[in-house]
Amino acid sequence: MIRALVPGSFDPPTNGHLDVIERCVGIFDEVGVAVIANPSKSSLFTAEERMEMLRECCGDWPNVVVDSFSGLLVDYAQQAEAQVIVKGLRAMTDFDYELQMSQMNRHLTGIVTLFIATKPEYGYLSSSLVKEVAKLGGAIDALVPEPVAAAMKERLA
Ligand code: PNS
């Protein structure tokens, strides 16, 4: 049984995140979506709200479990008995930092990190840009799942 973790801030979850999670659903026995409870950047949604949105968006996938963590990701991965961390890569700009984190995580516990290339049409997509566009009145409906778009509209109203 291979359990993979897809960790992130998910503030908010985007179509790019869901694309990576969906790929994992078809590859791994179990997929843990791990929401960091206190991201370094100040968040628009609480961890509970981010988890709730993810649960709604992942509802069709029976092998997805949404949870939150704080502290080191590798400690959480051990506790959750996950063998693999999965990260989405949008472009080379993601690569340097993601490679560094994966090597640090490997150093800490030996855990494997796998990278999934995101869909090209989501290459420009990030939670921070979605928040900026939404705050300034732009359309985000094509960028995030429907429950997330609704939650964003309510939060920014
Ligand atoms: O969605 P993000 O903001 O790119 O997610 C980053 C996240 C949460 C995966 C990363 O910051 C993380 O793993 N934080 C947990 C703390 C930790 O383990 N730090 C050492 C990383 S080598």
Image (cartoon, grey):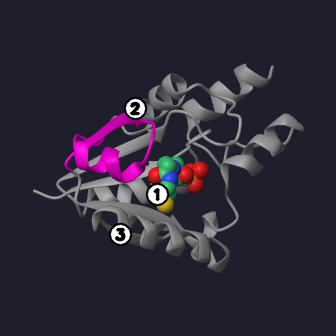
Q: Which residues are magenta?
A: 60-81
Q: Earlier in the sequence, mark 2 or mark 1?
A: 1
Kindly indicate the quadrant of the structure image that contains residue 38.
top right
**Residue 15 visible in rendering:** no
Circle 1 crowding by C-alpha within 10 Å: few under 14, some 14–19, many from 20: some
How far apart, in angstroms, are the residues tagged by discs 2 and 1? Answer: 15 Å
Residue 89 coordinates in the image, percent (x, y): 54, 70
Mark 3 lies on residue: 106
Instruction: Report helix, strand or loop for mark 1.
Output: helix
Is 134 covered by the magenta stretch? Answer: no
Q: Nearer the viewer, mark 3 or mark 2?
A: 3
Quadrant where the N terminus is found in the figure: bottom left
Q: Which residue is mark 1?
A: 19
Secondary structure at numbered mark 2 = helix
Q: Amino acid at mark 3?
A: Arg
Hey, what amino acid is under mark 1? Asp
Label 3 packing within 10 angstroms: few (<14), some (14-19), many (20+): some
Say which residue appears at 63% left-offset and 25% top-offset: 151
Residue closest to the far right: 136
Asked if the magenta segment contains residue 80, the reply would be yes
Q: List the residue tagged with mark 2.
A: 55
Separation of residues labelled 3 and 2 (CA atoms): 29 Å
Front residue of 115/60: it is 115
| Residue 53 vs residue 113, the one in the foreground | 113
Question: Which residue type carries mark 2?
Answer: Arg
Q: From where the camera sits, is residue 155 visible? A: yes
Upstream in sequence: badge 3 or badge 2: 2
Compare residues 98 and 31 and report the one nearer the observer: 98
Question: Seen in the image, is 2 located left or right of residue 109?
Answer: left
Q: Alpha carbon of mark 1 to alpha carbon of mark 3: how far?
A: 25 Å
Of the two numbered discs 1 and 3 in the rendering, the one whose residue sits closer to the viewer: 3
